Image: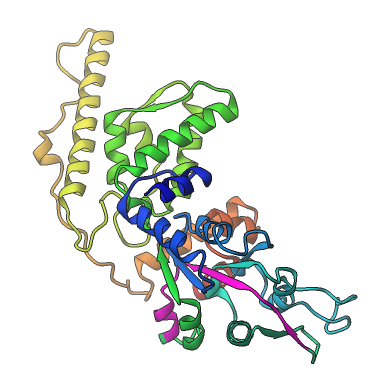
Amino acid sequence: MDDINKVKQRFSIIGNSPALLEAIGRAVKVAPIDLSVLVTGESGSGKEFFPKIIHQYGARKHKKYIAVNCGAIPEGTIDSELFGHEKGSFTGAISTRKGYFEEADGGTIFLDEVAELPLTTQARLLRVLETGEFLKVGSSVVQKTDIRIVAATNVDLLKAVEKGKFREDLYYRLSTVVINVPPLHDRGDDVILLARKFAADFAEKYVMPGITFSEDAQRAMLLYRWPGNVRQLKNIVEQLALFNAGEEIDRHTLLHLLPMDYSGNSSLVPSGAEHKYEAEREMLWQLIYGLRNEITELNRKVSALQGEKSPILQPEPVQSLIKYEPPKEATPDVTGVSPLEQAEKDTIVAALKKNNGNKKVTAEELNISQRTLYRKIHELGIE
């Protein structure tokens, strides 16, 4: 436990959930053993910390550490980026270039979004893992490299293997040791700890009075699903720190900034193996009671101004305001496009318009790779 606490302090990792502590513990234990490691977890959950832990606590800590976002490199140049190229091997190759596997010889390479690698590149990577050998693009000379590979993905690689999008032999080579990083909504009170830490950091960064969170706001944080995980929480707290400096953030202010999850799941329920509606029902009742109280207060103020004895708006009993039913599965409409696909398309179109068609910025805003964005644009018929 002392080792885990030292790691948390060194890498500024906030949280005490058992799943997070287990992931850190696995990283510390495997670090001295020169094996390939696969880090899995949702986008924004903090996977990038674990290859750094493995590198710093391993025998290669004094050698190079290179992080590569496989999803951000165009398919036509990724082999050159990873393995290097010879002069004249393709248009624009005006000189010989070293790739990451040559540059980081003796050190560690972190391959983020490894599921985005093209199949041809996967074959080259498999050769490195099996023999330590690679070829530069345009070269027939075999080169050796001594590299430790840590890969990360938010994709179910076994399903990708079944669909023929990822090599099965490469999957087993990469996943000698697997570290599962828990999503934020499975980390319990860590959400509150992180929100307070981010609030303090932003108050110091922007030299502004800090924000605090009411009990209602904290309950809402615990109920919310956080589809964007820690990255989303940090973004929300930054907005609150800027525009509500010095205030106590209540539930209403917080919920105003929380988008609904358009993935087909409610964002206002805690996760679990079985979907339970009690937490969602509680949140809905809180919203209804809040609206009813606001109507009552509005009546009081308007009546005081106009000298009227009877309220202008008469709120209905809460029980008649909502008939709760579990959400039904989305079904395709007559055009063959499901509401889920339409929501996804609308979200991408809106993001593209907001960013003036800049696909790189749009992909970053949506927390997906550029390659995934291009595929979605093609599949959804976005012009």
Is 162 positioned to the left or the right of 86 in the image? left
Instruction: Say which residue appears at 37% left-offset and 35% top-offset.
Output: 254
Above or below residue 205? Residue 63 is below
Residue 303 vertical placement versus 98 (above, below): above
Over which residues does the magenta segment extend? 142-161
Q: Where residue 331 appears, x then y in whole percent?
A: 28, 71
Q: Position of residue 132 (x, y in %)?
A: 65, 83
Can you give x and y, in whole percent of width and height, for residue 27 in the image?
Answer: 45, 61
Q: Residue at x 38, y 45 (%)?
A: 15
Q: Is residue 156 magenta?
A: yes
Query: For this view, does 351 lie left or right of residue 288?
Result: right
Q: Is 273 left or right of 152, judged from the image as shown?
A: left
Image vertical order of residue 378 relative to residue 316, above or below: below
Please tell me which residue is depicted at 18% across the width and 32% down the height of the picture: 289
Q: Residue at x 37, y 61 (%)?
A: 263
**Residue 207 place in picture, x, y as percent:** 58, 23
- Regarding residue 370, the answer to whether it shows in the image is yes
Is 41 on the left-hand or right-hand side of 315?
right
**Would you identify the image quadrant in which residue 321 lies?**
top left
Please name whichever residue, 295 or 20, is drawn nearer the observer in this view of the structure: 20
